[in-house]
């Protein structure tokens, strides 16, 4: 595994904890469930948790695999998401922590100086995403999801809703949440709706 993939996994892991706990340092989450949902082995999950803990991004934890985000971890994630083009103390710009494998019509800049990059979603496509999100919420309401899965699905939906309310929505944040929703709801009609949101994003690069 290369260093870029390790960084991506660490960031996604910490971001998931932040979303599931709503940034509450006193809320605990099962580390093994997060690792499983991200397709990690138990050894990989343990390595990520150890690294995040050593850097002070996680709290003291608890018996049985329960972990919590630290105040420093909350600051790290919120800074990264608020300023996706800038590096934080522990992570490179959010726009660079992406999986290039399935990228279409996307924007990436690396190794540039004095350059700028912006993403403005057209009103029509924003309305389409909102409509699909409402369909997704209705479809999810009819599913009998496990509590852990339901909590993560709700957190990802809330992330998309927050971006849709922003004057300058961050494309990669919406895209990553849609991917997570698609994977969490795999095998259901709701997963197809999440795929529809991804399709709208990739078809409207400007």
Image (cartoon, rainbow, N blue to C red):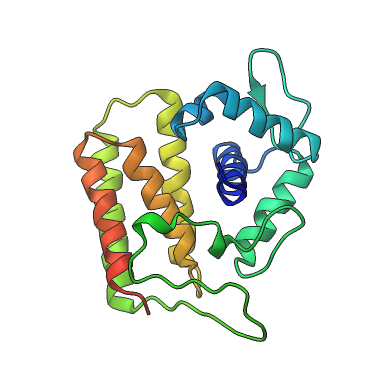
Farthest residue, direction left: 189
Q: Which quarter of the rendering shows the C terminus?
A: bottom left
Q: What quarter of the picture does the N terminus occupy?
A: top right
Do we see residue 27 in this rendering?
Answer: no
Left or right of 139? Residue 121 is right
**Number of callouts in the render?**
0
Q: Quadrant of residue 26?
A: top right
The correct choice, above or below, for 159 with respect to 185 in the image is: below
In this rendering, position of residue 106 left or right of residue 3: left
Q: Quadrant of residue 175?
A: bottom left
Pinpoint residue 102: horizontal percent, then vertical percent. 34, 56
Q: Residue furthest front?
A: 2
Q: Position of residue 170 (x, y in %)?
A: 49, 67
Q: Quadrant of residue 65?
A: top right
Find the residue positioned furthest to the bottom: 114
Residue at left 73%, top 45%?
A: 73
Q: Is residue 188 left or right of residue 103?
A: left
Residue 39 spot, x, y in % from top left: 45, 32
**Residue 196 placement (x, y as % from top left):** 24, 56
Which of the two residues, 108 or 62, is positioned nearer the viewer here? Answer: 108
Vertical relation: 84 (above or below) 98:
below
Instruction: Decide: is 28 above or below 2.
Output: above
**Residue at image location 52% in from the left, 29% down from the top:** 35
From the viewer's perspective, tell me whether residue 43 is left or right of residue 183: right
The residue located at (66%, 52%) in the rendering is: 77
Question: In the figure, 54 relative to 174: above or below?
Answer: above
Residue 172 appears in the rendering: yes
């Amino acid at each position: 595994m290369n260093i870029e993939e390790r960084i991506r996994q660490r960031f996604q892991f910490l971001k998931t904890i932040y979303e599931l706990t709503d940034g509450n340092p006193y809320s605990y989450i099962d580390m093994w469930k997060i690792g499983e949902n991200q397709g990690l082995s138990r050894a990989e999950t343990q390595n990520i948790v150890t690294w995040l803990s050593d850097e002070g991004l996680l709290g003291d934890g608890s018996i049985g695999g329960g972990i919590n985000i630290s105040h420093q971890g909350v600051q790290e994630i919120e800074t990264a998401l608020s300023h996706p083009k800038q590096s934080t103390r522990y992570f490179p710009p959010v726009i660079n922590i992406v999986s290039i494998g399935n990228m279409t019509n996307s924007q990436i800049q690396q190794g540039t100086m004095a350059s700028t990059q912006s993403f403005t979603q057209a009103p029509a496509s924003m309305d389409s995403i909102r409509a699909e999100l409402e369909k997704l919420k209705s479809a999810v309401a009819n599913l009998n999801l496990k509590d852990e899965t339901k909590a993560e699905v709700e957190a990802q939906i809330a992330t998309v809703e927050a971006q849709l309310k922003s004057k300058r929505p961050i494309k990669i944040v919406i895209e990553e949440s849609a991917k997570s929703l698609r994977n969490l709801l795999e095998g259901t009609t709701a997963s197809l709706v999440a795929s529809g949101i991804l399709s709208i994003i990739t078809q409207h690069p400007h």
